[in-house]
Image (spheres, rainbow, N blue to C red):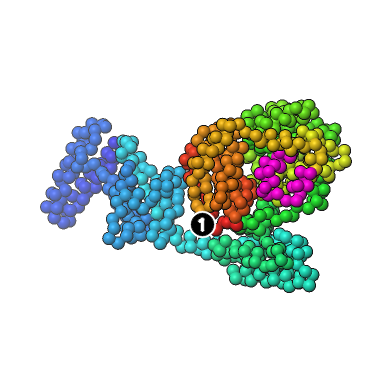
Amino acid sequence: MTQKSKKRVLWAAAFFTAILAAITCIFYDYKIAAALLPILALLLYYLLSAKEGKPLPSIIEPTVSFNKALWKEIANKTSSAIALTGANDRIIWENMAFTNKIQKPGQRISHVVDILSADVLETLEKEPAEVDIGSERFLVKKVKIQANNKKPEKMLQIYYFDDITQIYNLKLQLREKETVVCYVYVDNFDEVMVACGEENRLELLAEIDKTITKWVYNYNGLVRKYDNDKYLVLMSLKDFKKAEEAKLNILDAIREIKAGKTMTPTLSIGAAYGEPSLTKAGKIAQNALELCLGRGGDQAVVKAEGKTYFYGGKTEEMNKYSRVRVRVIAHALGDLVEESDSVMIIGHLFLDMDALGAAAGLANAVKSMNKPGYIILTPEQTSSVDSLLELLLTDEEIKGSFIEESEALNKITKKTLLIVVDTHKPSLLMSQKILEKAERVVVIDHHRRGEEFIDKALLVYLEPYASSTSEIVTEIIQYMGDDIKISPIVATAMLAGIAVDTRNFAFKTGARTFEAASYLRRAGADPTMVYKLFQEDADAVYERAKVLQRAQQVAEHVVISYFDEEPKNPTVAAAQAANGLIGLKGISASFVLAPMGERITISARSLGDINVHRILEELGGGGHMTVAGAQLSNVTMEEAIEKVKEAILKHLKEGETN
């Protein structure tokens, strides 16, 4: 209030006091009127003698106690719990709702940290947060009040606790009734029917239908069969969560059905929920099923609210590897090459012999079709394949195929075909820029499909049953045309790629693997040269021996070890050390870590009864049941070892074996 405004108020008060004194004196008691005269005199004295701008005497100064009282009364009557705190979050005042709802009987809460965690307090600096206090749920908001002197120690905070328990419980009830869309597919239906005698096929079909229907009805769901090997299943989220808690044990139940002496049916399940419509959920469930099949089947993939969950995947990939499919892919690839002005082949970060061998084979085939073929290679990516690269550089035709990223970016046009080999994850590519610029992309890989995928590909050939990408490329080349020829040096490189991924044909080797090797041998591949490519110097052998000595047992039949210094070829060294550990008696799975620049590379091997793919998938890696790898960034060796141990123990605890 300004000084002039105050004086006007006081003149009015003086006038009112004079009138009141006169009326009291005339009509009532003069003594009462006399009591008002000192007040009138004091007001007149100040008004007549005070200078402009002089403050009111303290006895006359109006106060704002009414506003304070009003705010306090409103705050006490509101249903929201309110706490006023100082700079150290010590509660200096609280309303009745806070006392009744937040305080526990016989307990005094003196600080906000007694009821809110450090994470919640950090969140409240930016936005409101929902917290559970006792059996109730509150939406907590924080408002800062700056005192007049603006000193930090005088800063006040008001915490509002709105009880949203009823709304939250209602949301949960509605959420539990949300519909989950599931696509269920019998992976190996054709193979099972062939293995089962004709007289028993109807009985087998009925057994599969009965098992699936019983499982769905057990969770109050709805199932409709829309093809011989395909089912649509709908469940409420509440019941589906129960099925998830049981690890979707329908996968195990189906596997117990026998078709013939050795064959058993397996399922792939794609499920989705948390979408705005059933149409959207259905599309995402279909994508989940495709991801499931790309990982080899016999598992379930659940997509919910931007996250992906995997169940099963305990058995080796189902063999859906047909020559008809290879021929179709080969013809389609040939057509794409013919329509292109040039072809570029790119592998993953930290190239291995399989990726380089497959790239060399494709480049040789493209040149046989009179099209320019290039292999994108950066110098820092060649450390693990030095010996193979040296061999390829002796072939004059292939030697001119290697280009660096900068040159490739300049050569790419709208008609350039980019072939990605030995990976399907964009983050693992040698160059993100090249993938972004290329408009026509083909993916050829033998790893189990992960959640991350190159979506822009025109043609995808993902065959997890194959031993290696070099094996896949060898078969493709045979069907691309009679004029396609590969040189003996390229054939040797592709044979080396197969050998390194199968550990010299000991693991993940099928009849088709030997057939591919036979074709390469006829094309001039030199097994002796392949053997020489794997030769090591004495220092590498000594260092690997130290790794074997450092091995420590994480669980029964599972060991882990590491290199204390970066070896010459980290990925190869880690793989060879893991191979050495798995060769020890009583060891079923081995994990070896090695420093690689600013990263830690991990190589895992298994005899098949422990799924190393699922374990390293937790760390962003993957591969196959028996051979897998991963890379960790921004961690020390000790931290990386602990992460691997945690992943191993987690999966062993969950029974992710065999």
The question of residue 511 being in magenta is answered with: yes
The question of residue 404 being in magenta is answered with: no
Q: Position of residue 323 (x, y in %)?
A: 80, 51
- Image-based side of 101 in relation to 535, left or right: left
Which residue of the protein is positioned furthest toward the left in this rendering?
31
Task: For residue 137, say whether it is visible.
Answer: yes
- Image-based side of 6 in relation to 599, left or right: left
Viewer-proximal residue among 98 and 288: 288
Q: Eyeballing the image, is 280 above or below 1?
A: below
Task: For residue 454, say whether it is visible.
Answer: no
Q: Residue at x 32, y 43 (%)?
A: 88
Q: Residue at x 45, y 59 (%)?
A: 164
Can you tell which quarter of the image residue 243 is in?
bottom right
- Image-based side of 597 in relation to 148, left or right: right
Which residue of the protein is positioned furthest toward the right in this rendering?
482
Please give the residue where the numbered disc 1 appears in the rendered image: 653
Q: Position of residue 65 (x, y in %)?
A: 27, 48
Q: Eyeballing the image, is 63 above or below 346?
A: below
Query: Which residue range is magenta in the image?
Result: 493-518
- Image-based side of 547 in relation to 72, left or right: right
Q: Residue at x 79, y 28 (%)?
A: 397
Q: Quadrant of the N terminus?
A: top left
Can you tell which quarter of the image residue 576 is in?
top right
Q: Eyeballing the image, is 100 above or below 41?
A: below
Can you tell which quarter of the image residue 44 is in?
top left
- Crowding around mark 1 (Cα neighbors within 10 Å: few <14, some 14 to 19, many 20+) is few
